[in-house]
Structures are given as structure tokens and as C-alpha cells.
Amino acid sequence: PTYFYTPNLVATNDHIVDGRQILDRNADMPLALFTAERIDYSLHRIRHYTATRPEDFQDFILFTNYQRYVDEFVTWALDEIKAGRATHLVEPGGRVTGADGIPSCEPIAKVPQMPAYHLVRDGHRGVTLINIGVGPSNAKTITDHVAVLRPHVWLMIGHCGALRRTQRLGDYVLAHAYLRKDKVLDHVLPPHIPLPTLAEVQLSLSKAVRLETGANASDLKNLLRTGTVVTTDDRNWELAFEDYAVDLNKSRAIAIDMESATIAANGYRYRVPYGTLLCASDRPLHGEIKLPGMADAFYQERVGQHLQIGLRAISLLREESDAGTLHSRKLRSFDEPLFR
């Protein structure tokens, strides 16, 4: 007879990373965070969602929620290749541009759901940028799968709504805590589980802001706000403001978005160092909403700088990784598998 192998869905799960194996002390303990079936599943999903090969992913990952960051990244990446600091750029559909500056093919006809762009350096020391779009569902989906590649760090750089009267459009927000109203991970990581901030990541992001903006100590305090970021699953949360007001007040929230807490929560689950640096694109509680003219002026002024801050932070974190001090003990469980 002929046998057709089908996936074993019982073994395709996150029981190891979610700590369920500690309940069975008599069983063999796992050597890694993921089973072979789980890894294989995610490798196929990565191809589907990003239209790039898992082999092209770099160890340092930026997530964003807006296409203009992609445009800036591609321009920067091509300059890095010309300068000899990277070997090539991989775009969706396997479009490769090397030192000669000639792409291997035309841009992909149909852009995937979450396109990825890889500035490749030897030893996977380059940078991958993924445009995850808007919403916690996308953020969970892509981090579920990228986690099996075991990146050294992932950072969220995107837009947010500023919640405090003293904040201005274009100000930066460094998340020191998250109010998780996204709900998509509540069944595996309940909201009462704290998400610790990671000193190495926080210091790198704040230093990158100072270096890229040239701000002195007093100016930096006005430009960069640290505090709680709220992540919601409701893009029109303003219409239910009464339901949010008390939680925003209790949490001392300074910004709201739809992806950051999800990315941080999955970073915590999967032992991938994480961080969030957002840029205020509107002030929904104070009458400044995104209008076409205002948005264009904001994007032209801030997107390029914001991306460069994220890339500078990656450069600093790469140094931490080289020194072996990036992977925080805060992310390790009681019975951590041998292989990261």
C-alpha cells in the first residue's frame, strides 16, 4: 500500500514554550523550545505571509505598521550595499539586488500580507524589516512563526496615538510597560502575567534616539516620553472611550496602538528580546486626528528619522549580542530547554 504522510497536529503546538511540560516530571524533557513539526509548519507559513525564504531572514528584526518605513528601508539598504557594508537586499518574490545595483527580477505582482525585506550580511548579522500592517492578529501571526528562526531581537517601530496633553505630533514613545487590551494571547499568556522591560533593549533605544536626533538631556526629555503603551484590538476605540477611560487613567498610559503589546508578549513567550519605540502621529484625546495634509507633513519629517533610530538601536544591540549579554535571564523559565 502507499502511505501519504500528513502533519501530526498533536505535536504541532507551543506546549514547550508555554511551560506545559513542567506538569509531567516523569516524561523526557525537551532539548529545544519547538518540536520538528512546529518548526516545519512555521517555515512554510513564513514563505506564505512574507513571500521570502526563511533562509533570508536576519538575526535582527524590525516590525513596522506603515509602508513608508519600507520605502526608507529599501533606500538605506541599497546605500549600505554600495558602501560594502552588506552583500545584498532580498525583497518579496525573491527579488535580489547586489553590489551591481541591478535587481534580479521585477517587483512581485501581488504583495503578500506581511512583506519582508532583508538586508543581508555575513552570518545573518543584517536586518530584516517586516511590514505587519495594522492589528494584533497580524502581530501575533508573524511573531508565532518568526520565533522558530530564533532571532536575537525584535523591535516594533511604528505609529501611535499620544494620550497626554504635553505630547506633540512627532514625539517618540518608549514603552516601559504594556496594557494588553489586544486579547489575542490571553488564552496562553493571561494579562495578569507581567511583561518585564529588558534593560539592554531600553538603553539601546533611548541612546539611539539621542544619537540620531542630537538632542541634549533637556531636549530629549521633551522629545522622548517613557511609560505605558496600550494595545487595543479596536481601531475605533474612541467611540467606546467611556469603556477605556478608567483603565487609561489607572495604567498612566501615554500612548495607544494595535501591535506593540502583542509583539512584546510573544517575545516574552518565545524568549526573544523585544522592545517598542513609537512615534506620535495623532492625539485622539485632544482633537488632533490623522488628516491627509497633516499626515503627509508628519510622515515626510519623521519616518526617515524614526527608521534610522531603529537601525541605530539594532547596531547597538548587535554589539550586545557579540558580547554575549543580549539574551536576558528575565526570559528564561524554570525548566529552560538546553537549546535556545
Image (cartoon, helix red, strand yellow):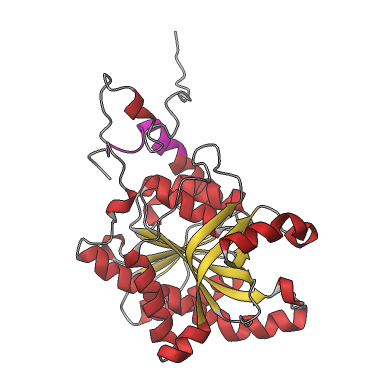
Quadrant of the image containing the N terminus: top left
Report the front residue among 282 and 144: 282
Image position, residue 134 (x, y; %): 64, 59
Which is nearer the eye, 181 or 273? Answer: 181
> Residue 138 at x, y = what percent?
59, 51
Q: Taking 256 as reference, is 17 above or below it?
A: above
**Res. 119 image quadrant:** bottom left
* Above or below, comparing residue 94 to residue 277 in the picture: above
* Residue placed furthest toward the left: 323
Horizontal side of 259 relative to 333 (left or right) equals right
Count of marks, rendered view: 0
Left or right of 91? Residue 37 is left
Residue 232 visible in rendering: yes
| Magenta stretch in the rendered image | 32-41
Q: Position of residue 251 (x, y in %)?
A: 57, 60
Can residue 34 be found in the magenta stretch? Answer: yes
Magenta-span inclusion, residue 273: no
Residue at screen point 36% across, 61% down: 198
Q: Name the one closer to the observer, 38 or 282.
A: 282
Is 273 left or right of 136, judged from the image as shown?
left
Residue closest to the far top: 1
